Amino acid sequence: MDEKLIQRLESAVLRLESLSSGLHPSASQSGGAHAPDAALDPSVVAFADLIDQYVGRVSGAAEVIGGQVLGVTKLVQEAFNVQKELLIKLKQTQKPNLAGLSEFLKPLNEVITKATKLTEGRRSDFFNHLKAAADSLSALAWIAYTGKDCGMSMPIAHVEESWQMAEFYSNKVLVEYRNKDPNHVEWAKALKELYLPGLRDYVKSFHPLGPVWSPTGKIIAPSKASAPAAPPPPPASLFSSESSQASSSKPKEGMSAVFQQISSGNVTSGLKKVTNDMKTKNRTDRTGVVGAIEKETPASSRVFSKAGPPKFELQMGRKWVVENQIEKKDLVIEDCDSKQSVYIYGCKNSVLQILGKVNNITIDKCTKIGVVFKDVVAACEIVNSNGVEVQCQGAAPTISVDNTSGCQLYLSKDSLEASISTAKSSEINVLVPGADPDGDWVEHSLPQQYIHLFKNEHFETTPAAHSGG
């Protein structure tokens, strides 16, 4: 008999034994009389099967690798086990208010915080593994969806969007180890399948419109420690290494904003939309007075003399400006359309995700930046930059690279027909999907040296080819 099947049967027996041992009089107190029934609910049993099948595969690969990869994988397993307990609790609990929801999600948030801390500090050799695993756990926040006005995408879309951010680092693992160690490749593939199709299909089958609370269950009472005395300032995202910086200047909502509030103990109070008074054309503080203030405060002038102040805003309703963002790994543009453009300038060691379809994307004077986008109408332009990684998940008719050193382009199947133009650039690699849907990425290097020969009254230009002697 297959070893995995035996493991699943053993885990099922252990669950049944734990349920039978839990049938005692005290279970009928505090609204817990139906705990065994809740644990046997089809949605809970299906989630347990998901853990056995998909999390088990990730854990198996991690045990072979060991070290930090095994450590972060254990936290992934712990997070899924916590969510299973929350699903059981869900069946016994009435829909809570915001304070009660924060208390309900607290165990899950604690595990995610532990995973995020592994990515902080000195960067390890397995940073991409740690980042992929930690970022992927935001997908488990689908259980916080309370309705269309809660600021989150619907559960299925939330799982998909959360994995897209983690996939940026997962793809790096695949590229780095595809010819070095198949165990790392197996780990990255198993992690992806845990969410797509694993968690996504589970949510689609049992909770497509959000979690279903018990109409007659007990009420979650927030602990005194979690009851807010006064509204706190919006905290940084769990996925940002700069936890002390406020993120209220970012005009976004949804996945990142939800986890910002989970980490503060207040789920949705800090979610903001870009209102008319927040747009640049209506900002009263964007006047000529700024120059006079800068003269009066030379200290602040020295701070921004080279890079300038960071910006993350929609200007005139047409242009998203992302400027001078340093060490920001959780930048997300959600509310965008095909008439808007995105201009990224002077950013360093940051990651930007563009969730919607936009007209044009320009990356200018950036260093070590990653940009993930879905669709672009006109072109994606990369100029005067160094160490850029761009991933197109949809379609892009034109991609241009000018005066750039070190550029990796990840193309989806829909963008393979893109026209790529290069000028005064070096070390440009394009990665495309393999023939096998589950296969590795195939890397192609674009030539940077050319041979020009004068023939038949004109010059003929061909890429230079090198061979070892």
Image (cartoon, helix red, strand yellow):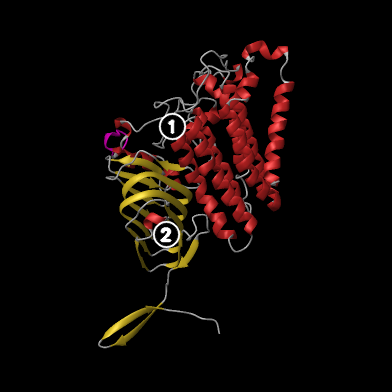
Residue 435's x, y, as percent? 47, 61
Horizontally, residue 289 falls left or right of residue 56, namely: left
**Residue 278 magenta:** no
Amino acid type, mark 1: Met
Residue at which label 1 appears:
152
Marks 1 and 2 in Cβ contact (< 8 Å): no
SS label for mark 2: loop
SS label for mark 1: loop
51 or 3, which lies in front?
A: 3
Residue 160's x, y, as percent? 47, 41
Q: Is residue 127 visible?
A: no
397 or 93, which lies in front?
A: 93
Q: What residue is shown at x 37% (from left), y 31% (from top)?
A: 273
Horizontally, residue 304 falls left or right of residue 87, namely: left
**Residue at the outermost left position:** 457
3 or 1, which lies in front?
A: 1
**Residue at the outermost front position:** 1
Q: Which stretch is magenta? A: 281-287
Q: CA distance from mark 1 to mark 2?
A: 34 Å
Considering only order in the chain, which callout, 2 or 1, is on the residue closer to the N terminus? 1
Residue at which label 2 appears:
385
Residue 71's x, y, as percent? 68, 44
Horizontally, residue 230 falls left or right of residue 51, namely: left
Residue 243's x, y, as percent? 54, 37
Q: Main secondary structure of the magenta part?
A: loop
Amino acid type, mark 2: Ser
Q: Check the image and report above or below for 464 versus 248.
A: below
Q: What residue is shown at x 51% (from left), y 43% (from top)?
A: 197
Q: Check the image and report above or below for 282 versus 30.
A: below
Judge the density around disc 2: few (<14), some (14-19), many (≥20) Cα neighbours within 10 Å.
many
